[in-house]
Amino acid sequence: MSDTPTYPIDFYSNEVVLDPHPHYRAIRELGPAVWLPKNELWAIGRYDDVRAALRADETLISGKGVAANTYMNNDRQVATLVSDGELHVTYRRLVMKPITAPEMKTLRARILATAETLVDELLERRTFDGMTDLAQVIPVSIVSHLVGLPENGRENMLKWAAATFDTLGSLNARGRAAIPAVQESFRYTTGLRREDVDPAGWATRLFQAADDGVIDASVVPGLLQDYIAPSLDTAIFAIGHMLHLLGRHPEQWQAIRADPKLIPNAINEALRCEAPIRAFTRYVSEAFEVGGQVVPKDSRVVVIYASANRDDRHFPDPDRFDIFRNASDHFGFGHGVHTCLGVHLARLELSTLFAVLAERVETIEVGEPTYLLNNVLRGFTALPVTLR
């Protein structure tokens, strides 16, 4: 590998997790595929190359796991995220049925009422934590009840989701510490029976699909995991990032207040600037050529969504937050067959919440956020916010 572009960082270290963008830029500048010896991964970070990698799902496969460690890739349960081909199509169609765009229409009124009550309460308080008091409220209150888990399951969804993403990086101290929570979530879903869940909830649909012979009953616990993680964190961290960016750019918040039709654009731009999920890995089933660089068979690549979103080959002045930019082709929700399962629900939650904020809030002021230390997620644990 003497002539191979190499970058000697630990992609999952605190340094890179807390300040990733200089490292993403270095990876992009080094080449289309860059060897990370400390992680034994090939990194793909340029926009066109990330898009090509995410479309090459027959070569860069997910069925052998999407983690950066052997333990999780060998010990994975059935889930949409770690399946390929027709099996993936079957699982995805089933899991996504209640969260497709047509189904979301029936949720709009419920999300709107929750958002209006929440914003009114926060305006009374004026200063609060933007993550626990705002960003988490709608996704947790809506999604946890929609899934239809018993109360003890709903209470643990956030903990289990964060732990799941931590174990999908390297098995560093964070990854190892998260394993017990992931095992706890697996034990919980494995122990669930049809009579335990809300008959009108999403989980019931999975049990019904097993009864109908669409899937084997043994895969229901794994597919339940798809509702625990992807349906929460993408929306929660996207709300946090959008609050932070708009608080730091008050002129753009005023533009949204003047023209709420800018909200979808602002959502895309926030997701472009700060993708809630940094990257997943793929297994290279056959040698893969990208930008003239060959990634060898039986290796593993980390496909960096967050890097592609800041590639100046595709997005001019990429470090600038600009709600007037057309950023609809960002990778904040992934791309291709493995696009985020919760994309429609997340967009509905974000657009509804920020429409209510635009109607009722004149100024958003933010303090310094506290960043989450997580191997895969990019977001805040706390964000001081004042609404006026």
Image (cartoon, helix red, strand yellow):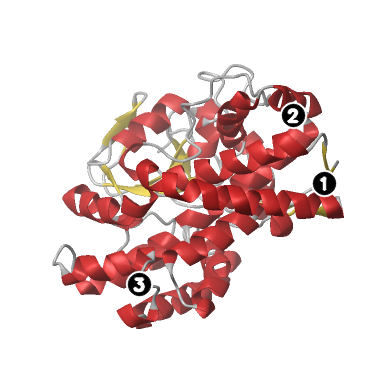
Lower sequence index among marks 3 and 2: 3
Left or right, 347 with respect to 63, comes to: right
Asked whether the residues under the numbered discs 1 and 2 touch, taking CB atoms below 8 Å apart as contact, a structural biologist would say no
Q: Amino acid at mark 1?
A: Glu
Rendered view: 125 above or below 167: above
The picture places residue 130, in percent across and down from the top left corner, at 74, 51
> Which label belongs to residue 253?
2
Q: Amino acid at mark 2?
A: Trp
- Quadrant in which the C terminus appears: top right
The picture places residue 38, in percent across and down from the top left corner, at 52, 52
Rendered view: 156 above or below 249: below
The picture places residue 350, in percent across and down from the top left corner, at 58, 42
- Quadrant in which the N terminus appears: top left
Q: CA distance from mark 3 to mark 2?
A: 42 Å
| Res 294 seen here | no
Which residue is under mark 3? 199
Q: Amino acid at mark 3?
A: Pro
Q: CA distance from mark 1 to mark 3?
A: 43 Å
